[in-house]
Image: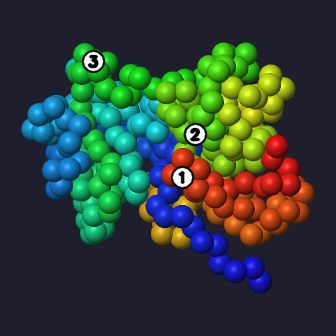
């Protein structure tokens, strides 16, 4: 029996986790009016220009749509307001009845008509919520994100243009949300392994064929993560809104598999720290 995996903690919810959350919430919350808002930790409102605006702007608004860009979840509210949520390092959203006891570290509760509550649980409080006007939203980091890695994955030639002359490692560039929004440590390692690309390679050194493989690998990796509900590690920091764990953890090819055999070539998966991030890769088949 292989030894238990040593997960680098914590792992931030990434695009598949946020998109899975969005898909679970959308059919239940869209069209519902917000009746009450509670914020139990002031740190959750650190991105709100005036903390009191969050509760005031949400109350009595209807959720008209729910979208995502990268790792940001955006509820479009009546009155041309946007409720933005970022899950941070350990956050997750729950749907619950008011009769169900709140879990520890439940810092934001938004109650809808009918009683259903959207609860934001975040032990480390690196996540945040904010309610923005259109002008305010245009000044946030959300407006400066690159194309979404799932919904707006650029064609190969556009990726080549974006990476031309870049000397930073391709792993670091995949994590740069201004280049491509949504990838984090788990899915960047998984995509690079699928593509057979060494994470240390300067971004500008990849030729068109390598970028074509990488683009296909990003698409396939995100699709697989979504198919299995995202990745829940042993700490269960990320769970689906209904409390289920994401099952992609059992299908990871590189991330967290230090010293295990590569599923493609049999060489051991190694772990290194690259630009201060744990990086899992195979020296045998990632060139």
| Disc marking residue 172 | 2
Give the foreground label among 3 and 1. 1
Circle 1: element type: strand
**Residue ID at (54%, 52%):** 277
Q: In which quarter of the image is residue 8?
A: bottom right
**Residue ID at (81%, 47%):** 286
Circle 3: element type: helix
Query: Residue 207 versus residue 88: which sits nearer the camera?
Result: 207
Tag 2 near tag 3, CB within 8 Å: no
**Residue ID at (24%, 52%):** 108
Coloration of the structure image: rainbow
Quick check: 183 left or right of 143?
right
Tag 2 near tag 1, CB within 8 Å: yes
Alpha-carbon span between mark 3 and mark 1: 34 Å
Nearer-N-terminus badge (2/3): 3
Mark 1 — residue?
Answer: 277
Furthest residue toward bottom: 1
Furthest residue toward right: 265
Query: Residue 74 versus residue 242: which sits nearer the camera?
Result: 74
Alpha-carbon span between mark 2 and mark 1: 9 Å
Q: Quadrant of residue 33?
A: top left
């Amino acid at each position: 029996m292989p030894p238990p995996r040593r997960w680098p903690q914590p792992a931030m919810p990434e695009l598949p986790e946020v998109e899975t959350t969005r898909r679970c919430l959308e059919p239940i919350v869209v069209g519902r009016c917000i009746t009450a808002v509670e914020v139990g930790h002031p740190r959750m409102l650190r991105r709100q220009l005036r903390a009191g605006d969050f509760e005031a702007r949400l109350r009595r608004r209807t959720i008209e749509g729910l979208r995502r860009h990268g790792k940001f979840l955006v509820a479009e509210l009546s009155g041309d307001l946007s409720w933005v949520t970022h899950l941070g390092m350990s956050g997750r959203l729950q749907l619950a009845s008011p009769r169900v006891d709140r879990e520890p570290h439940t810092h934001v509760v938004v109650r809808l008509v009918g009683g259903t509550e959207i609860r934001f649980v975040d032990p480390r409080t690196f996540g945040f919520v904010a309610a923005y006007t259109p002008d305010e939203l245009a000044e946030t980091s959300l407006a400066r994100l690159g194309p979404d890695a799932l919904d707006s994955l650029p064609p190969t030639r556009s990726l080549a243009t974006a990476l031309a002359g870049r000397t930073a490692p391709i792993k670091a560039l995949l994590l740069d949300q201004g280049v491509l929004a949504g990838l984090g440590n788990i899915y960047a390692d998984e995509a690079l392994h699928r593509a057979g690309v060494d994470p240390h390679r300067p971004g500008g050194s990849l030729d068109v064929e390598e970028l074509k493989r990488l683009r296909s690998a990003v698409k396939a990796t995100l699709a697989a993560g979504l198919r299995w509900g995202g990745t829940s590690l042993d700490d269960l920091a990320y769970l689906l809104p209904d409390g289920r764990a994401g099952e992609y953890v059992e299908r990871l090819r590189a991330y967290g598999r230090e010293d295990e055999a590569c599923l493609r070539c049999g060489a051991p998966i190694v772990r290194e720290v690259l630009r201060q991030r744990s990086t899992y890769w195979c020296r045998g088949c990632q060139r």
